[in-house]
Amino acid sequence: MNDKSTNAVHFRRIAAVLPVKDMVRAHDFYTRVFGFTKTFENGNPVGFMILKRESAELHLSLQKDYDAPPFNVAHIIVDDADALHAICQREGLRIIKGLRDHDYGLRSFVFEDRDGNRIDVGQPA
């Protein structure tokens, strides 16, 4: 369907929202392990946080009773999937799907963060 009113809207960005059980632990993980920087936080205690690195953005939302679903909740494109895979292994993260090349031109793997969020990582071939 091609609605002219929809075509007038220009999407600027979409950011993944990751529920987390412990905001301090999640902040430490994404900043220390993956090099993100906090650009915004809200609440006392903090219940929402925005992290950025280059053009990637993650929104963390405190959900103390969160049970992660058994599917991918975010997809990240990187320029070196092997390097990020090695970091995930070094940190002892659970690798859901191992690093492999796909016939559709992507090298990818899936890992779980400390809250069980499954994140699909891809590198264009």
Image: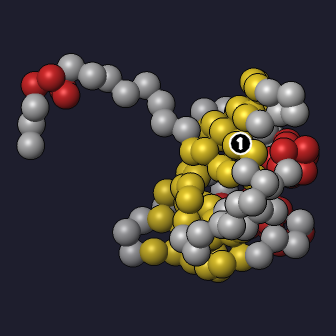
The structure residue drawn at horizontal position 9% and vertical position 36%, both measured from the top left corner, is: 2
User: According to the image, what is the colour scheme of the structure?
Assistant: secondary structure
Percent x, y for residue 50?
Answer: 71, 32
Relative horizontal placement of residue 16, taking residue 12 as reference (left or right): right
Q: Nearer the viewer, residue 29 or 23?
A: 23
Where on the picture, by quarter, is residue 3? top left
Relative horizontal placement of residue 70, taking residue 111 as reference (left or right): left
Percent x, y for residue 36?
Answer: 78, 38
Percent x, y for residue 62?
Answer: 75, 45
- Answer yes or no: is residue 79 visible: no
Q: Nearer the viewer, residue 105 or 2?
A: 2
Quadrant including the N terminus: top left
Check disc 1 and report its element: helix, strand or loop: strand
Where on the picture, by quarter, is residue 87? bottom right
The structure residue drawn at horizontal position 58% and vertical position 75%, both measured from the top left corner, is: 70
Percent x, y for residue 42?
Answer: 76, 26
Residue indicated by mark 1: 60
Q: Residues within 10 Å of mark 1 (few under 14, many from 20)?
A: many
Residue positioned most to the top: 8
Q: Nearer the viewer, residue 106 or 62?
A: 62
The number of discs equals 1
The structure residue drawn at horizontal position 70% and vertical position 43%, both measured from the top left corner, is: 61
- Answer yes or no: is residue 61 visible: yes
Q: Above or below — where is 22 with respect to 97?
A: above
Relative horizontal placement of residue 74, taking residue 93 as reference (left or right): left
The structure residue drawn at horizontal position 32% and vertical position 23%, both measured from the top left corner, is: 10
Amino acid type, label 1: Leu
Q: Nearer the viewer, residue 18 or 34?
A: 18
